[in-house]
Image: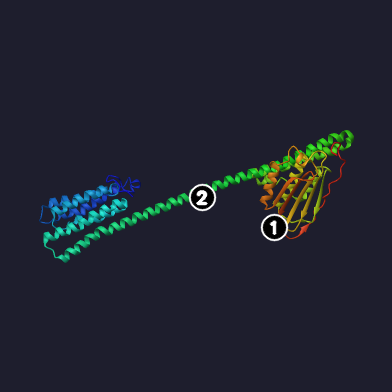
Amino acid sequence: MNARPWLSPGLSFADRRDGWVGDVALAGLLLALAALFPYLIGFRYLISPIELQLLASIMMIAPLALRSHYPQVMLLLSALGGVAHMLVANGPLPCLVVVPVVVYSVAREVDAVSARSAVLIGVLGAFAGPVHWYLSNGWELNFLVVVVLVCLGMVLTPYVIGRRLQESAKAKDAAERLEHERVQTLLAERDQRARMAEINARQQIARELHDIVAHSVSVMVVQAEGGRALAAKKPEKAAEVLETIAGTGREALVEMRRIVGVLRNTPEEESTYAPMPGLADIPEMVQRTGDRVTLRIKGHEPACGPATQLTVYRIAQEALTNFLRHAGPRARAEIELGFDADRITVLVTDDGLGSAAQSDGMGNGLKGMLERVSAMGGTLEAGPRDEGGFRVHAVVPLAATGGHRRLGAITPTPREQPKGQQ
């Protein structure tokens, strides 16, 4: 650390701009006790007039008014007063009580390199003053040694105390800065987590809306196209097709209202909406797509949580959506649900266009399925089959659960195939 300029303020000057009153009060108190009072009672040494001794005392004490603002200037002026003290007195004056205060103030207020000047000047004075008094008064050598040691103690002790206090203050400031930085880091991390949570929530909502809208619209389009051909052949069946379209639209609206209700975060509104779809809703979903899709169940439905059920439902839903959109009007599909004690397997295969389709479905749908399965710790395989068509195979692991229950009403009701969809 480089030495500070002599006219630069103390290290704590920024926090003590209004400290003039205290410094001036301290200087005035010491002037009264160590300079004026001895002058009034006639305390003096015969080497010079008492007025000169009073002047020397004032020169040593008055610079204390600069103690916390310009400590190095105070040191220089007090040192000049100390020189005047040796010239006008052949013994120690009461004003020497200012020495520990000056050394402490310099050690406390300036950096380590600059503070050594106070030690240097103080040590020189601790030897020069007693030697001068020894030669002037004929002291014994032992007494001289004692006086020198006392003077050194008046210099070194306050210096050590001042340095320790400054180092403690610096350590405290550093700890406060580190704590402030830590708090700022925690706040930044919290904001980052909040942003990531918001992004994840948006992605989840986007997946939900994609699955709902894409599947419902695909089913309605397929039913409408088939219904148009069926109306010309069997008009009485048109009402059944229209009912399927209307039911699909109503279900899509209910699910979208549920999502909107979650976004509004109003418990009384959420309670009016239907729960999230699960395993028991898969047969009805398959039935709405017509007799081009068949459903097979292996095993018994396990007791699993709503998140797992929703994941399986959305996988089957998205796979059927891709089938309706890309497999072609004559293709057929099969959904196989395998229930084991530790996992649920979803296998969707079709005999449609497969790799020959204009779009293989490698868009947001399959990405959404992969994200859902990965979030549950499962695996997903999707792609065209070698023998033609497309295949989706997902494995969703289960936590240890007890008991199984039967999934009923699986097989969709056969319907007459609309013209143009054979």
Q: As drawn, is 202 to the left or to the right of 284? A: left
- State which tag comes first along the sequence, 1 or 2: 2
Taking the spot 28% from the left edge, 57% from the top edge, the residue there is 158
Residue name at image x 28 percent, y 53 percent: 116
Judge whether residue 85 can be spotted in this image: yes
Query: Horizontal and vertical percent for residue 48?
Result: 10, 53
Q: Where the C terminus falls, by quadrant?
A: top right
> Do the CB atoms of the residues marked 1 and 2 lie less than 8 Å apart?
no
Numbered badge on residue 341: none
Whole-percent x and y of residue 146? Answer: 19, 64
Q: Can residue 98 be seen in this view?
A: no
- Which residue type does callout 2 highlight? Leu
Give how far apart the Cα atoms at labels 1 and 2 are: 34 Å
Q: Which amino acid does label 1 sit on?
A: Ala
> Does residue 18 appear to the left or right of 395 in the view shown?
left
Which residue in the protein does label 2 denote?
186
Residue 227 pos. (x, y %): 84, 36
Q: Nearer the viewer, residue 340 or 94?
A: 340
Q: Is mark 1 on a helix, strand or loop?
A: loop
Hey, which residue is sitting farthest front in the picture?
386
- Density class for disc 2 (Cα within 10 Å; few <14, some 14-19, many ≥20) is few
Q: Which of 121 and 14 is in front in this view?
A: 121
Front residue of 38/187: it is: 187
Circle count: 2
Q: Which residue is denoted by mark 1 in the rendering?
A: 399
Q: Is mark 2 on a helix, strand or loop?
A: helix
The crowd level at tag 1 (other Cα within 10 Å; few <14, some 14-19, many 20+) is: few
* Residue 315 horizontal/vertical position (percent): 73, 47
Q: Quadrant of residue 246?
A: top right
